[in-house]
Amino acid sequence: MKRNITKCRCCNDNLFPFLSFGKMPIANGFLLRKNFKKEYFFDLKVCFCKNCYLFQLFKQPSPKKMFHKNYAFFSETSEYMKRHFKKTANLIIRNFKKRRNFSILELGSNDGIFLKNFKNNNHLGIEPSFNVFKVAKSRGINCINKFFSTKLALKLSKKFDVIYSANVLCHISNIKDAIQGVSILLKKNGVFIFEDPYLGDVIKKTSYDQIYDEHVFVFSLHSVISICSRYNLELYDSERQTTHGGSMRYFICHKGQFKKTNRLKNILKEEKRNRLDRMTTFKKFRNQCEISKKRLLALLASLKKKNKIIAGFGATSKSATTLNYCGITDKTISYIADSTPIKQNKFSPGSHIPIKTYQYFLQNLPDYALLFAWNHKQEILKKNKFFENSGGKWIVYVPKVKIL
Ligand code: DWN
């Protein structure tokens, strides 16, 4: 069932739709040819709440359509992300090592990429997608296969020193229920740390492809403060992250437990300067998305005119928005290479471009590779130096459409 949301998911005030990307499929709904006819689509529209500053989707498909036993995203596909989570775990261990019986909970623990660093600690992961949960479980990680909610929080009979969540909160439509659940499970002096793609980066880089079914929200500090204040929680610190093309890490405690940091105050000032609390910013963003789309289409058309072969690299969730919004099909992109087995030998959602293995890419080098996994640019370019050495060229479209 589609959810017809017209009111803000946080404060129930009116929402202002400002951008429509048109009909969209499930971003991780890689499919076989025989399922093309029954593919599910919804209207991907974006709105802003002028009251609590929450940037959100108008409608989001049901969570069960997105997170299930065949979820296609495994966090461990990137070396950079492995290092990021190891570093984060070390930081937490350093800061909390003096606490007796230290305990940590992760919301959306995926394949265990983060929690594997806490095997010797009292830890728990909650993960709704069965296949990735199973991988974590097989690695000896304590986890449960459920959607996180207040109901579940009430059932867990303990509290945690740290609750951590990366690229998960922005997926949960019932955000109030999730935050209430966190407030129940967080010890009095505990810290809730979460990170998600940051609205400031999405606007600055025109990374419109961060907007798709799973990402029902793109947070800013302003919106996080609004949500937390409803549950007696407080944002006391925040830190920029380079992951996923620009993310923000939020540090939250029970009200009054920790002093607000200067870096939090500075980022809040920056948000004001960049007008992340104003509707006009999002109207400008809409125009920037259109410009980006036109430039990408113009570049691809000029290359096709010269009979160049173009392949995609990284069948990301993000690419679903790019491909469907721009109307790019297999007439332009011959195939998309991706290292995730569950995506391979299927077709990209909506645009129906064949997904091939990395070996296929090596054996069928295109003239140009359109980097849908632009957030992993450094890692991918380093691993594939030979591609450029053999005359191949990379195309990126964030922050600008260009041939590298
Ligand atoms: O929030 C989310 C983030 C964390 O991950 C989810 N909603 C889903 C997912 O989004 P995404 O699919 O846009 O994430 P990535 O990390 O940009 O996806 C990279 C894709 O590229 C993966 O399918 C793996 C693939 N890849 C590859 O084929 N070769 C990645 C690397 C680094 C490579 O060398």
Image (cartoon, helix red, strand yellow):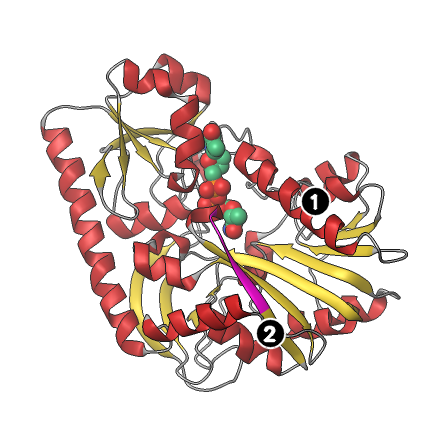
| Residue type for callout 1 | Asn
Residue 330, quarter of picture: top left
**Part of the protein shown in magenta:** 237-242
- Earlier-in-chain disc, 2 versus 1: 1
80 or 394, nearer to the observer: 80
Q: Residue at x 41, y 85 (%)?
A: 14
Which x, y percent locates residue 325?
A: 28, 52
Relative side of 73 to 245, left or right: right
Which x, y percent locates residue 387?
A: 32, 18
- The residue carrying mark 1 is 90
Q: In the rendered view, tell whether residue 31 sits above or below residue 354.
A: below
Which x, y percent locates residue 191?
A: 71, 65
- The residue carrying mark 2 is 260
Q: Secondary structure at mark 2?
A: loop
Per the picture, the main secondary structure of the magenta-coloured stretch is: strand
Which mark's residue is nearer the viewer, 2 or 1?
A: 2
Which x, y percent locates residue 154?
A: 82, 71
Inter-mark Cα distance, 2 to 1: 23 Å
| Residue type for callout 2 | Lys
Mark 1 is surrounded, within 10 Å at the Cα level, by few (under 14), some (14 to 19) or many (20 or more) other residues, namely: some
Q: Residue at x 55, y 68 (%)?
A: 173
Mark 2 is surrounded, within 10 Å at the Cα level, by few (under 14), some (14 to 19) or many (20 or more) other residues, namely: some
* Residue 275 visible in rendering: no
